[in-house]
Amino acid sequence: MKHNVGNAMVFPANAQVRHHLMEMLGDRARSVPNKEKREHFRYPLPSIIEKAEIQHPGGSKVHAEVLVYNLSSGGIGFVYTGYLHRSTEITITLHTLRGELRELSGKVAWCALLTRQFHAVGMQCDEKSDPRDYIEPSIIAVHNVEDESARRKALRGRVLLVEDDKMEANLVKMLLSDTSLRVDVASDTGEALDCLRTESFDIVLADSVLHRDTRVDQYVPRMRDEGFTGPIVLFLQQRDNIDPNGSLPGACTDVVAKPLNQDELIAVIERALRHSHDPTCSTDLIYSTMKDALKFTSWIAEYIEVVRKKAKLIEEALRSENVELAMDECSAICATGVSYGFEILSEAAQETITALKSSASCTESAAEIRKLLRVIKRLSIQGY
């Protein structure tokens, strides 16, 4: 039951429940993949109850108390007693250390079920704020001296290293051994393209020249043609006639000069992963955002199994150039993905349908088809 005080719904939790919620939030934070992609460090707060104004997509406005548990310069983490749709507009009133009240406005970035009653919500603020206005200096100091080795260990993802020199490839692996990055090596163009067709990667590290004659501006565009839209970092030879401050060849994202430096290499990878905006190009598992998804795990699991069977039919359609089969299976996926909480799946299927209609060819739509197939591989269920 939700209680009202004035016009605001009271957060219905005593101290013991709040303590349990904070423990659950801590467990969840430790299990979240790719935290290194966050642009702003999140400082923990001691479960503060603050007032919020929530503008629901349907037009209704609600005033309620929320449990604020972390804060960054770009966002707020809080617990709410219901489900909030992505992009829901919110204004939270926070108390500063000086006792002032300040309103921080933004939109819901994500919402995840914690318990039957409570949801954890991430809010992206419209404007940046200074956490020092709200958090004790001692807390900020402790977290600002976070151990460098722990930060590197938190760097996760799957890397495709395109390098024909075995010693250079081993060197890159050694330089990245302090991280949790998984490195796959492709020694030539054909092997690299095969990897991108069949597997998902978060980032590609590419040597500027392969086998002395294949340059990056010749083979990197082919990676893009395979549907890889993630970051591609170029290893730049000092003798290469490429201006690192000018436009990069082959649609690369960034450059690292040889001889390789560990700090620079890790910093470039961190930056590239943090600013990678295509959610279809990742190795993160994709979970259903369906409200009360934990109650319907068996049905969601059955749906994922059906979609994977459809993926095999789509692969067959690509091999046999059967546009009609590909369209039928993609249309079925597009129509059901959102309903089962897999919005990204429906979006990828719609992109594939658009490409098939435009080209009337599976071969010419191969990039979109393979992107869809990689998304399907990442579908999963929390707790499984």
Image (cartoon, rainbow, N blue to C red):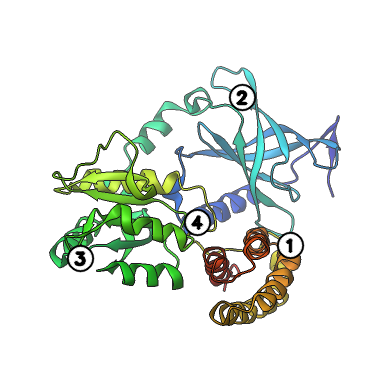
Sequence-earlier tag: 4 or 2: 4
Q: Which residue is mark 4?
A: 32
In this view of the protein, can residue 54 be seen by the observer?
A: yes
Camera-side residue: 325 or 339? 325
Which numbered disc, 3 or 2, marks the residue closer to the eye?
3
x, y percentage for residue 128?
A: 54, 27
Q: Secondary structure at mark 1?
A: loop
Left of 274 or right of it: where is 319?
Answer: right
How many angstroms separate mark 4 from mark 2 (CA)?
28 Å
Q: Can the viewer see residue 150?
A: no
Residue 276 drawn above or below residue 159: above
**Circle 2 is placed at which residue position?**
95
Q: Disc 3 versus disc 2: distance between alpha carbons? A: 57 Å
SS at badge 3: loop
For the point 42% across and 62% down, which residue is it?
201
Look at the numbered discs 2 and 1 and tell me whether their residues touch, using CB distance below 8 Å: no
* Disc 1 target residue: 292
Question: What element does badge 2 sit on?
Answer: strand
CB of mark 4 within 8 Å of CB of mark 3? Answer: no
- Label 3, on which residue? 164
Answer with the quarter of the image where residue 125 lies.
Answer: top right
Q: Residues within 10 Å of mark 1 (few under 14, many from 20)?
A: some
Q: Amino acid at mark 3?
A: Asp
